[in-house]
Image (spheres, grey):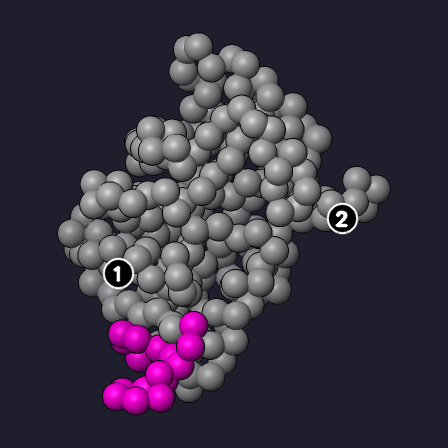
Amino acid sequence: MSSSTSTTAAAGAPLEAHQKAYIELAIRTDVLKFGGPFTLKSGRLSPYFFNSGLFSTGEAIAQVASSYAAAIAKSGIEFDVLFGPAYKGITLAATTALALYRDHNISVEFAYNRKEAKTHGEGGSLVGASLAGKRVLIIDDVITAGTAIGEATSILATQSDAKLAGICIALDRQERASTDDNDPDKRSTIHKVEEKYGVKVLSVCTLGHIVSYLQQQGGLEEQLAKVQEYRARYGAVEQ
């Protein structure tokens, strides 16, 4: 069920047009930065940093939505509703639903949650389409520890007969979940999420795609070397 593969220091991944465009947009808008080192939540020092919150223009979010839509359409996952966990998932759900219809003639509903339930008006914590009895694809930016996905699935569990169909994120870092170098479990958080919930986790791009992009571009040899070194040390091995 895993969408990830064993990593090596040198290997990239086949780079599709929408993935290349996404990476170039991320670099141009400083969403994807090289250098650092950047301290991650895990405590690791990374030679690259990804912050999708900096996609903040109409042009950028339109291209982001197109990239998500391309990944979802290609996957063949069957679903009825896009669900975006608050807060970053809200914009992603709405704009990706639009892009799926515009670019692929796929019309789906979308919904998102409030962090705090309303006690007046229509009330409740959900906005948009009903999730009851529907196949739901969760859409978010990244999976770090899987906490946000756990919260989203808890919301689904409160909706009668709602079924998790899959998860789609922006970037799969393809690195080990465990921060203990002596831990024999070398799987990624994404692999663990897939096993726990029994669904596929899609990603617009992976670290392997970033490596391929750096390999194809001239003048980025220093950045490539640092990313490959980091990947060799912390890369996930899916079993």
Q: Which residues are magenta?
A: 115-133
- Which numbered marker is on residue 94? 1
Query: How many labels were placed on the picture?
Result: 2
The amino acid type of the residue labelled 2 equals: Asp
Label 1 and label 2: CA atoms lie apart by 37 Å
Q: Is residue 122 magenta?
A: yes
Q: 28 and 128: which one is in front?
A: 28
Q: 92 and 49: which one is in front?
A: 49
Residue 129 point in image, percent of width and height: 27, 75
Q: Please, is residue 5 above or below residue 94 in the view? A: above
Q: Please, is residue 101 above or below residue 18 in the view? A: below
Q: Please, is residue 56 above or below residue 222 in the view? A: below
The residue labelled by disc 2 is 185
Q: Is residue 117 magenta?
A: yes
Q: Residue at x 48, y 50 (%)?
A: 142
Q: 84 and 199: which one is in front?
A: 84
